[in-house]
Amino acid sequence: MKQITTFDAYLRAYEQSIADPEGFWAAVAEDFQWHKKWHKVLTWNFTEPRVSWFEGAKCNITENCLDRHAARNPNSVAIIWEPNNPAEPSLHITYQDLMRRVNTFCHALKKIGIKKGDRVCIYLPMIPEAAVAMLACARIGAIHSVVFAGFSSASLADRIKDSGCCCLITADAFCRGEKKIELKKIADEALVHTPTIQHCIVFNRLNEPINMLPGRDVWWQELTNNCPDEFSAEIMDAEDPLFILYTSGSTGKPKGVLHTTAGYMIYTAYTFLNVFNYQPGEIFFCTADVGWITGHSYLLYGALLNGATTVMFEGIPTYPDHGRLWDITDKHRVNILYTAPTAIRSLETFGTDIFKTKDLSSLRVLGSVGEPINEDAWRWYHTHVGKNRCDIVDTWWQTETGGILISPIATVTPLKPAYATLPLPGVQPVVVDEQGKELTGSPAEGNLCIKFPWPGMARTVYGNHERFRQTYFSTYPNLYFTGDGCRRDAEGYYRITGRVDDVINVSGHRIGTGEVENAINEHPDVVESAVVGYPHEVKGQALYAFVICTQKIPDTEKFGAEVREVVAKKIGAFAKPDKIQIVPGLPKTRSGKIMRRILRKIAEGDTTNLGDTTTLLDPSVVEAIIAGSR
Ligand code: WTA
């Protein structure tokens, strides 16, 4: 792949990608290993919708991640693993070694009958086996569905059921900071509700005593024993599914976003190489968990497709102290650091003394992802971490987009703090107003849509194509609607302002308000609830729950703790509301719709201008809520 190294080259590449998208992406795809080339680069419409890239082509993404590099540079390091506890040794896994581990695990999966098209759920901590499991699935043609290890048993069960997984891969337990998480125990609770699971493979991480159900549960270490370390990859069609990843939306249960093989491969590889300006031999450190899309596309696939060395960190930025990310950076001489604004803001609260004892001279490029980065955090990152010499790439994208869509190209695009800047080649953003009219001039402010397909985009919601159409392609005809608001300045630079729907971004975790409300409503004393987001210094946004109760609650503190516990059990600890207010009623329209706009204002503490409340069934309820919020 040709790397973009000047702003002029970017402009030219962009122009070409718009004038001749098929020619542009075909040229990028040339450099990959194919069993058969495509007969048609792109077929698409945004009404069904149907998008198909590289039709007729055959390949396996893992041959491009592993075999290519293992053949040329067998001893170059693919994964550096840094354990939670810094006293434990880190691991350096070469491309050859990683390929062997993946092959061995392919045999293990085959041995228990997993085949092409089967769904396999991966519920693992940040250990190399998570990467091995994902790659082995891809290599045998099984569809992986990774569930973040911070999700509760109920969330895990829902995800397993929705995609009908036949196998679960998990671990006995692991530590995040000081805290031990008994993963197999949580998985066991889920497995009571998941009849489709025939096998549960358990990696022994901590030697914890756990229950193993004979016939269903098997140790990773035993299953892989005596398995050969060569395996020829399943040859996949370009549009064969690669993975499912659940993400939250405005309404209903989380959606199983489905990504397919060739387009995703080309897109993550291309964007990794260009956005981070990756140079051969460099060390890339992405702090995202493999349970999220950033972990899939950049920690794993994008990095390996480019033969890069990727750092996988099991722990948290504040353990054993708040210098951990900088220690890892120095220890492994990290060149590119990719993290989230929430991590930056939380480290910012500890001050800058810590930097006196850290070197950080290996750093060259810094990345930000997951939520808008405020100017303050941007400058802190730039000054104290990047020492004013590293470019910050503020990368905007989504689980559904598969890869980065709007971002500076490191060393190439002139930066502007808090701006994701310009669309990458192949990406055609449009800003529309509420009526769906395209705002062609700049500056402009409105909702962000994309009007042309890119190879990495999701193809459907697993098992529910109508929901895919409805969610992303029905708001504005012939446009992909992102759910984000944005501003485009006079120079055409984009600033993403946040979600315009009922998705809340708490510490970079996408949370649907409906999901949290459903969880809260499970509490026996709760009649109804409404959850909104409000600005939070560290988390970006936090959750505020307004709750109607069946009876007078004598101990509101205890009640609050119980409500948080229900949410932790139903979703995960990260979705616990920060504020809980018991209210006599909710502001509803005559048709019964909750006016969240009003609740958002109250949550923000801005009650001076609540806008029009005349359509409310009972406007007096608003006064009561405001009184109770003080
Ligand atoms: C938000 C994460 C502003 C946005 C890759 C999007 C951002 C949602 C940025 C997707 C950014 C992500 N600036 N907002 N650089 N990156 N977002 O699916 O609201 O977990 O719609 O994907 O995060 O979150 P998701």
Image (tube, helix red, strand yellow):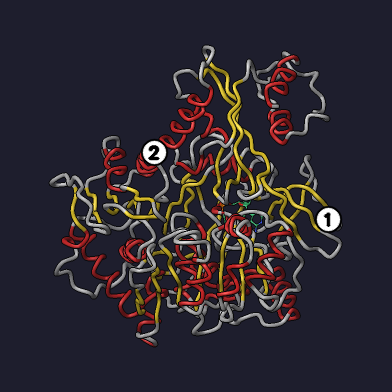
User: Could you say where residue 549 lies in the image, as x and y percent from the top left?
Assistant: 54, 17
Query: Quick check: 519 above or below 377?
Result: above
Whether residue 415 sits left or right of residue 237 in the image: it is right
Please tell me in which quadrant of the rendered image residue 114 appears. Answer: bottom left
At mark 2, the secondary structure is helix
Residue 440 tag number: 1
Q: Quadrant of the C terminus?
A: top right
Whether residue 433 sits left or right of residue 161 in the image: it is right
Marks 2 and 1 sit apart, C-alpha to C-alpha, by 42 Å
Kindly report which numbered mark, 2 or 1, lies closer to the viewer in this rendering: 2
Residue 158 tag number: 2
At mark 1, the secondary structure is loop
Specify the amino acid type for callout 1: Thr
Q: Using the rendered image of the protein, determine whether residue 54 is visible from the camera's viewpoint.
A: no
In the current view of this chain or complex, which residue is farthest to the bottom?
72
**Residue under the image location 61 percent in, 33 percent down:** 544
